[in-house]
Image: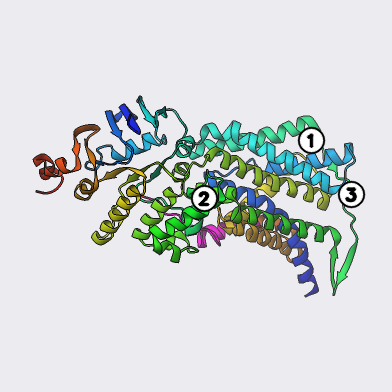
């Protein structure tokens, strides 16, 4: 059984149907990428999974439990955390306080301390900035903070929404290297990206989304080599 | 000079009370962007509750203050749940009009229950005066100042150093991102109303003690002035509300001393107009930019 199973998901914004019956699976240990152009419904998909956007119909289950109607809070507690698009870090709070917000639902003080150290290992720059207002960080540093903050919840499945957005190519490489590292340490990943090349290169499997429908699916390698994808997303 | 210093002392007492009320306005605005026009009436309720428990049950000042804080805190939470929560995703003007409606309900229900005439407050704190140099200070003024300072320190501690305080700040920056951290936004909003309303309860009993007289419509003018104090300090900013409250209080007493008491309310509105022209975001307010 898959770790995350989405079945026939529909989401409407008023009269506009943003998701037109999407089904998708993520197995434990995988990196699954969801690629597609602007407006394809990628972010809507993640918001629906975390239940901060209401769903019209369809079901979502996580580790065998139906989470279709579970509150956002309980979904985080169950081990499913999201790094939202555009980082959405808490400005006015320090880097340290931002990280603590990620661990909001946890009560194990020692575990939190240990995970803070782990976050500083993954993102050494954050340790240097620990007492700085998060608003003073650069775009790349903010992305790292957003990822570290999500990891503080100790997720089993991490949803990443456009982690490469607005970053310089070198930083994009660095972020993707860290995503792989996080995955190798045992966290399953569902990645949403416009940067199809990078997203497919690290994915075990991928789904291609177009205006609310899944139009193509396969392993990362298959999709990279597919002529349609080459033409539409990789500029080949 | 003596006169000037004397007015500073008097103004600080009045200003402390405005500051306590202003904090509730500013915290609620910071978190749900609502000007809670019923907040002045919460403060009125606070002074009535303290009046009832001291005259009917005969308790002293501090138990009465705590009773008033608890009552106002609960009222604040209830009002938010019943009147504002259903409108959280409605237009801002609907919530604002609702707040005015709640304000009238509180004022006239209190009139119905307690009668509309003025009540004379019992003497709860001894009121001896003593001299510091040539300035006269009353023990009541000292009490007001010390209680206000303690409340502000406790509030700052809660906001800066507790988990709930961090959650309040996080929700005020980005509600959806806070939800993604597993924060229950409803709980955080309730907590904000609880804190702000409890502080209004403190202001309520202090005003009763300081002016000896209360009535069901007493919340209107100080409520407006405290709101102006919050705007002056930068709405959404907690230190701003403290500074704004003190400033408005001192300005008002100075006008009474050097001008005419006829203008004591006018000066506050003049300050509002000036701040809106010169620095609309207030003294410590942030320049709001739309996030993309």
Q: Subunit of mark 2?
A: A
In the picture of the structure, the residue carrying the numbered disc 2 is A111
In the picture of the structure, the residue carrying the numbered disc 3 is B123
Q: Subunit of mark 3?
A: B
Q: Is residue A234 above or below residue B112?
A: below
Q: Which residues are magenta?
A: B268-291
Q: Pointer 2 and pointer 3: residues touching (CB < 8 Å)?
A: no
Between A155 and B23, the one lying in front of the other is A155
Query: Could you say whether the residue bearing mark 1 is in a helix, strand or loop?
Result: loop
Screen quadrant of the N terminus of chain A: top left
Crowd band around label 1 with a 10 angstrom C-alpha radius: few (<14), some (14–19), many (20+): some
Q: Is residue B273 magenta?
A: yes
Asked if residue B169 can be seen in this view, the reply is no
Q: CA distance from mark 2 to mark 3?
A: 54 Å
Between A87 and A176, the one lying in front of the other is A176
Q: CA distance from mark 1 to mark 2?
A: 59 Å
Crowd band around label 3 with a 10 angstrom C-alpha radius: few (<14), some (14–19), many (20+): some
Residue at x-position 16% and y-position 43%: A221
- Image depth: mark 2 or mark 3 in front: 2
In the picture of the structure, the residue carrying the numbered disc 1 is B116
Asked if residue A233 can be seen in this view, the reply is yes
Query: Could you say whether the residue bearing mark 3 is in a helix, strand or loop?
Result: loop
């Amino acid at each position: 059984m898959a770790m995350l199973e989405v079945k026939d998901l529909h989401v409407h914004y008023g009269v506009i149907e943003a998701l037109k019956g999407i089904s998708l699976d993520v197995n434990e240990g995988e990196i699954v990428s969801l690629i597609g152009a602007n407006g394809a419904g990628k972010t809507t998909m993640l918001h629906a999974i975390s239940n901060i956007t209401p769903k019209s119909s369809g079901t979502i289950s996580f580790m065998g439990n139906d989470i279709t109607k579970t509150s956002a809070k309980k979904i985080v507690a169950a081990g499913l955390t999201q790094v939202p698009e555009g980082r959405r870090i808490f400005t006015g709070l320090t880097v340290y306080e931002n990280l603590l917000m990620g661990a909001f639902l946890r009560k194990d003080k020692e575990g939190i301390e240990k995970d803070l150290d782990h976050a500083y290992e993954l993102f050494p720059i954050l340790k240097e900035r620990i007492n700085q207002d998060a608003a003073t960080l650069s775009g790349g540093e903010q992305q790292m903070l957003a990822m570290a903050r999500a990891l503080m919840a100790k997720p089993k499945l991490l949803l990443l929404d456009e982690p490469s957005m607005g970053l310089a190519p070198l930083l994009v490489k660095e972020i993707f290297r860290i995503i792989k590292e996080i995955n190798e340490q045992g966290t399953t990943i569902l990645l949403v990206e416009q940067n199809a090349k990078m997203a497919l290169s690290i994915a075990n499997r991928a789904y291609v989304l177009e205006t609310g429908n899944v139009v193509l699916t396969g392993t990362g390698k298959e999709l990279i080599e597919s002529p349609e994808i080459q033409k539409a997303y990789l500029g080949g | 000079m003596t006169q000037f210093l004397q007015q500073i002392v008097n103004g600080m007492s009045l200003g402390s009370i405005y500051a306590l009320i202003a904090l509730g306005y500013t915290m609620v605005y910071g978190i749900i962007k609502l000007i809670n026009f019923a907040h002045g009436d919460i403060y009125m309720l606070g002074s009535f509750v303290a009046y009832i428990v001291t005259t009917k049950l005969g308790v002293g000042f501090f138990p009465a203050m705590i009773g008033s804080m608890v009552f106002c805190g609960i009222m604040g939470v209830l009002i938010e749940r019943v009147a504002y929560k259903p409108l959280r995703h409605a237009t801002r003007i609907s919530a604002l009009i609702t707040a005015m409606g709640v304000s009238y309900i509180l004022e006239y229900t209190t009139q119905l229950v307690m009668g509309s005439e003025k009540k004379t407050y019992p003497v709860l704190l001894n009121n001896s005066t003593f001299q510091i140099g040539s300035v006269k200070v009353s023990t009541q003024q000292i009490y007001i100042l010390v209680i206000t300072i303690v409340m502000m320190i406790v509030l700052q501690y809660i906001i800066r150093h507790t988990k709930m305080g961090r959650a309040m700040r996080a929700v005020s920056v980005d509600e959806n991102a806070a939800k993604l951290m597993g924060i229950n936004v409803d709980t955080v909003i309730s907590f904000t109303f609880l804190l702000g309303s409890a502080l209004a309860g403190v202001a309520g009993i202090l005003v009763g003690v300081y002016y000896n007289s209360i009535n069901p419509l007493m919340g209107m003018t100080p409520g407006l002035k405290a709101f102006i104090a919050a705007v002056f300090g930068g709405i959404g900013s907690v230190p701003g509300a403290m500074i704004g409250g003190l400033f408005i209080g001192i300005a008002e007493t100075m006008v009474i001393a050097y001008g005419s008491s006829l203008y004591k309310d006018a000066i506050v509105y003049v300050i509002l107009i000036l701040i809106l022209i010169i620095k609309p975001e207030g003294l410590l307010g942030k320049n709001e930019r739309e996030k993309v």
